[in-house]
Image: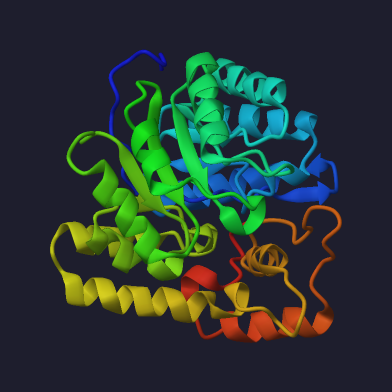
């Protein structure tokens, strides 16, 4: 896809794909293949690699490139593939964008650089230079909880006017902020895509005017957010809300901190391992789930239906 092509709106459910690991710097190749097919069979509308749920910033560049190569080759043209290029080093971000383009990815995604503090003028400069130099369309990723910096609504609106900036994902968890972004952009950029990250907000965000979601829990139960999105499109709002409640119930032991230690990425991988999809190993320096935590997750999954139970067919 040429970066100078006409902007086309991406919409629907675009999960942030986990990166299954065999060790801290080795890909669980079969697990990666199973996760991708599991998501595609669930009806998702795209895949987002190397985001927060994909532990992208914690992986070596060699491993990131392997993930991009393998997934792009496996997916082909079935759905768009977006690749996270968030980095503190501009040259590395562009290197990753160029590599993703050669591998066959559809677009790239970047949050603000995450070490130093930056003002909005700095962020606009970052967006403009990335958009200009990237061979693929750029999507912005607002993740203040991890990178310390927020793309202010006006900054997003100004970025939306740049020809190679195609969309925006918000993981702030702040619906008032998201509503302001939607209001600032208005009808001026009808093909600009706006997504919400936290799956607990998916139905509310769709009603606000977003075009889809990037729910981490879709790695485990992709059909639920896909069904929710389809119910929204059809105007079946009562069904949409019921599915949202089911998503919240199923995902509760993953997203809610177990005990006092953070670790939803670890818990998600534990659940995926129990579903027969991939290794439970998280990126360094996270530890695997304790035996107690694993039993807690396993007991919960037993109540969640066939989509979250171990399958003898996944070898």
Give the x, y percent position of residue 117: 68, 44
Up/down of 12 relative to 164, above or below = below
Q: Position of residue 70 (x, y in %)?
A: 63, 31
Task: State how the image is colored.
Answer: rainbow
Residue at the (54%, 45%) spot, across then down = 36
Q: Is residue 219 visible?
A: yes
Of all residues, the one furthest to the left in this rendering is 235
The correct choice, above or below, for 136 with respect to 167 in the image is above
Residue 78 placement: quadrant:
top left
Q: Quadrant of residue 219?
A: bottom right
Residue 28 appears in the figure: no
Kindly identify the residue that appears in the image at 40 percent across and 28 percent down: 165
Q: Quadrant of the C terminus?
A: bottom right
Q: Classify 222 as above or below 16.
A: below
Q: Toward the viewer: 154 or 66?
A: 154
Which quadrant: the N terminus? Answer: top left
Relative depth, front residue between 127 and 75:
127
Q: Residue at x 44, y 59 (%)?
A: 222
């Amino acid at each position: 896809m040429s970066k100078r092509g006409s902007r086309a709106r991406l919409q629907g459910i675009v999960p942030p794909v986990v990166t299954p690991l065999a060790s801290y710097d080795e890909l669980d190749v079969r697990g990666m293949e199973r996760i991708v097919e599991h998501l595609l069979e669930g009806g998702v509308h795209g895949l987002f690699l190397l985001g927060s749920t994909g532990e992208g910033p914690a992986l070596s560049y060699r491993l990131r490139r392997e993930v991009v190569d393998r997934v792009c080759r496996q997916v082909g043209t079935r759905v768009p593939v977006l690749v996270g290029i968030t980095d503190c080093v501009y040259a590395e971000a562009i290197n990753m964008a160029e590599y993703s383009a050669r591998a066959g990815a559809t677009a790239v995604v970047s949050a603000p650089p995450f070490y130093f503090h930056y003002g909005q003028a700095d962020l606009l400069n970052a967006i403009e230079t990335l958009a200009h130099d990237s061979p693929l369309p750029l999507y912005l990723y607002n993740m203040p909880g991890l990178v310390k910096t927020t793309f202010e609504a006006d900054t997003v609106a100004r970025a939306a006017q740049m020809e190679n900036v195609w969309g925006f994902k918000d993981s702030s968890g702040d619906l008032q902020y998201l509503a302001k972004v939607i209001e600032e952009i208005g009808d001026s950029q009808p093909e600009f895509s706006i997504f919400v990250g936290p799956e607990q907000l998916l139905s509310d965000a769709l009603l606000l005017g977003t075009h889809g979601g990037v729910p981490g829990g879709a790695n485990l139960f992709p059909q639920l957010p896909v069904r929710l999105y389809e119910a929204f499109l059809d105007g079946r709002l009562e069904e949409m809300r019921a599915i949202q409640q089911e998503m919240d119930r199923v995902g509760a032991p993953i997203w809610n901190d177990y005990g006092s230690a953070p670790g939803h990425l670890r818990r998600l991988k534990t659940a995926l391992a129990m579903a027969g999809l991939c290794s439970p190993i998280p990126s360094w320096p996270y530890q695997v789930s304790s035996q107690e935590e694993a039993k807690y997750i396993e007991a919960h999954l037993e109540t969640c239906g066939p989509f979250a139970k171990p399958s003898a067919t996944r070898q």
